[in-house]
Image: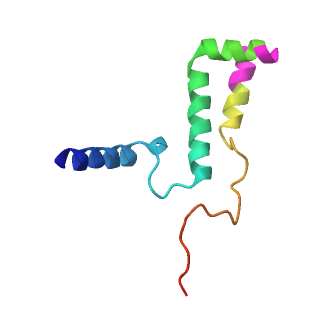
Amino acid sequence: MTERFNIHSQLEHLQMKYVGTGHPDITRYEWVVNHHRDSAASYIGHHHMLLMFGLAENQSAARMRYKLLQQMTAPCGKEPRGVDDSDEEDDE
């Protein structure tokens, strides 16, 4: 029983420490944005990935780095309005 509480406290600590690990109140949009930004940052950090993407798109590695950096500002477009992922319902 104590092992389960220990794992839960470790998970809470990781969620507070690192942005991309999520939390119970994260929306689907926020999670997808974090995922896309983490992926783009990984691609930028690994030069061989940039070369592969550049070869596939017939671009230089520097141009692919620039395109990925531009995508990181808004990787999934604008946040949708009126879409609520919460399961809360008003009890009247």
Pick the front one: 63 or 56: 56
Magenta part, dominant SS:
helix
Figure quadrant of residue 43: top right
Residue at horizontal 37 percent and vertical 49 percent from the top = 16
* Residue 68 versus residue 73 in the image, above or below: above
Number of numbered discs: 0
Q: How is the image coloured?
A: rainbow
Residue 59 located within the stretch drawn in magenta:
yes
Relative image position of residue 71 (x, y in whole percent): 70, 36
Magenta-drawn stretch contains 77: no
Residue 83: image quadrant is bottom right
- Residue at horizontal 59%, vertical 60%? 85
Among the 4 quarters of the image, the one containing residue 34: top right
Magenta range: 56-65
Q: Nearer the viewer, residue 28 or 78?
A: 28
Point out residue 53 in the picture as x, y percentages from the top left corner: 72, 18
Front in this rendered view, residue 45 or 20: 20
* Residue lying furthest left: 2
Q: Residue furthest front?
A: 1
In this rendering, position of residue 46 left or right of residue 77:
left
23 relative to 52, above or below: below
Residue 41: percent from the left, percent from the top?
58, 29
Give x and y (percent) for residue 45.
56, 21
| Residue appearing at x 69%, y 29% in the figure | 68
Q: Describe residue 25's horizontal placement relative to residue 30 as left or right.
A: left
Quadrant in which the C terminus is drawn: bottom right
Horizontal arrangement in the rendering, residue 21 relative to residue 78 (left or right): left
